[in-house]
Image (spheres, rainbow, N blue to C red):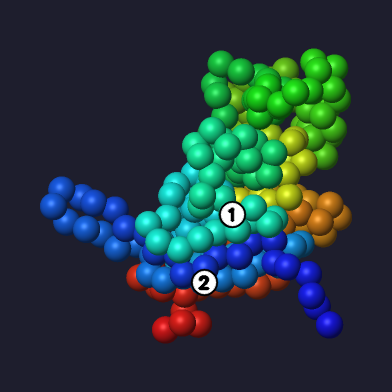
Amino acid sequence: MHTEKPIVAINNVSKSYQRGSQIIRVLEDISLNIESGEFLALMGPSGSGKSTLLNLIAGLDHVDHGSIEIGGVEITILSESDLSRWRIVNVGFIFQFYNLIPVLTAFENVELPLLLTGLTKRERRDHVATALRMVNMEERSRHYPNQLSGGQQQRVAIARAVVTDPAIIVADEPTGDLDRTAAENALELMSRLNRDLGKTVIMVTHDPWAGKWAHSIEHLDKGVLSHDI
């Protein structure tokens, strides 16, 4: 009998934005449990609320109603400073356009999240080396983003996502700016992190081919999970 609590528990979450005098409802009463070690794809048409839900799970945005509990911590009631500290340790981010800082080397980009921890310089160096080795980018550690291909930049971004050893990796259209070969490499890396290191991966994608790499798929349509429609 499975009694372990889900790593992510989303309960009756709603979210809307105001545009001028208009209220745009993005998510409507979403409830979803995600088990530890899951590789979940959030799919749906553009504007369905996928990225908004991902940002709420990652603590980048705030719910209007409802609660989100991650690893036993209700993040929806944390203060901004507590939420920021929580994110550094618990969530790794992979973005469509990599979000690497152009004036920093691959090594320095991967090191960035560690600067907010209490690790020594030597400990940070060891963590970064391990993360770059994991994505086969050790030899490019001193290169700047503009000296790397899109696929290589995404591998650096994946190294940055795992360098703090987070429990959860959130990926927003991680293959959207890559050709098929580079996309396959990125998805294989994410799959390996999930399979070999037990990372829970939550990926937003509109690409059914990318979605097939996930263990399970949740479809959003107009802010509602399809199993609730």
Q: Secondary structure at mark 1?
A: strand
Judge left or right: residue 59 versus residue 121.
left
Residue under label 1, please give it.
74
Number of residues whose C-alpha sits closer than 10 Å to that of mark 1, classed few (under 14), some (14–19) or many (20 or more): some
Disc 1 residue type (three-letter):
Glu
Q: Could one spot residue 209 in this view of the protein?
A: no
Judge left or right: residue 41 versus residue 220.
right
Q: Nearer the viewer, residue 148 or 107?
A: 107
Query: Residue at point 61% right, 40% down?
Result: 87
Number of residues whose C-alpha sits closer than 10 Å to that of mark 2, classed few (under 14), some (14–19) or many (20 or more): some
Q: Earlier in the sequence, mark 1 or mark 2?
A: 2
Give how far across and how far down residue 96 sits, in percent.
Answer: 52, 45
Disc 2 residue type (three-letter):
Ser
The C terminus lies in which quarter of the figure?
A: bottom left
Question: What is the C-alpha distance between the residues marked 1 and 2?
Answer: 14 Å
The N terminus lies in which quarter of the figure?
A: bottom right
- Of circles 1 and 2, the one toward us is 1
- The answer to which quarter of the image holds residue 192 is bottom right
> What label does residue 170 carry, if any?
none
- The answer to which quarter of the image holds residue 93 is top right
Query: Residue at point 70% right, 67% down?
Result: 6
Give how far across and how far down residue 3 sits, in percent.
Answer: 79, 75
> What label does residue 31 carry, if any?
2
Q: Secondary structure at mark 2?
A: strand
